[in-house]
Amino acid sequence: MQSTHEDKNVKAALSFVRAVEAMDGSRMEGFFAPNVEQIEMPNVFKPAGQVRDLSELTADIDKSKGIIEQQKYDILNTVARGDIVVLEMVWHGTVVKDIPPLRAGQNLRAQCMAIFEFREGKVIKLRNYDCFDAL
């Protein structure tokens, strides 16, 4: 059985996912440590991957409003051990406007894994592995 500490970390990780779904970067305040590092592993949209700090992560979440709508994460599995939370998810989103090779109204899907590292209740590192279905 998970400890209360692990339960709090899982709840925080799930809150982050819901804030991303809502495309609301302002909901990130208080969730991350000021020196958080978010690492997006290479994928079809970011072949070299990307490393972001808190301000870049918040800005990119807000920027997604003009690109994607109706995004949703289906949580498949949640694993917590100590200060680590792993979420296995399926992401769905609809493209808002034509951004070649994407078309407005196109539905996208990705198999995702997010690994959250917590310290004193705040996320200090987040690694995202997003495997998009063929475009």
Image (cartoon, grey):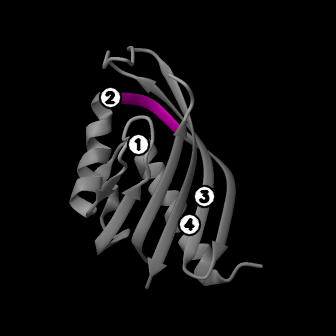
Mark whose residue sits in front, 3 or 1: 3
Q: Residues within 10 Å of mark 2 (few under 14, many from 20)?
A: some
Amino acid type shown at disc 3: Leu
Q: Residues within 10 Å of mark 3 (few under 14, many from 20)?
A: many
Marks 4 and 1, the one that precedes in the sequence: 4
Residue 125: image location, x then y, percent: 41, 70
Asked if labels 2 and 4 touch by Cβ distance under 8 angstroms, the answer is no
Q: Is residue 123 left or right of residue 109?
A: left
Q: Which residue is mark 4?
A: 11
Tag of residue 87: 3
Q: In 3D space, how far apart are the residues under numbered discs 2 and 3 (Cα atoms)?
A: 24 Å
Residue 3 image offset from top left, x and y in percent: 68, 83
Name the residue beneath numbered marker 1.
22
SS class of the residue under badge 1? loop
Residue type beneath disc 4: Lys
Residue flagged by tag 1: what amino acid is it? Ala
**Would you identify the image quadrant in which residue 31 lies?**
bottom left
The residues colored magenta run: 67-72
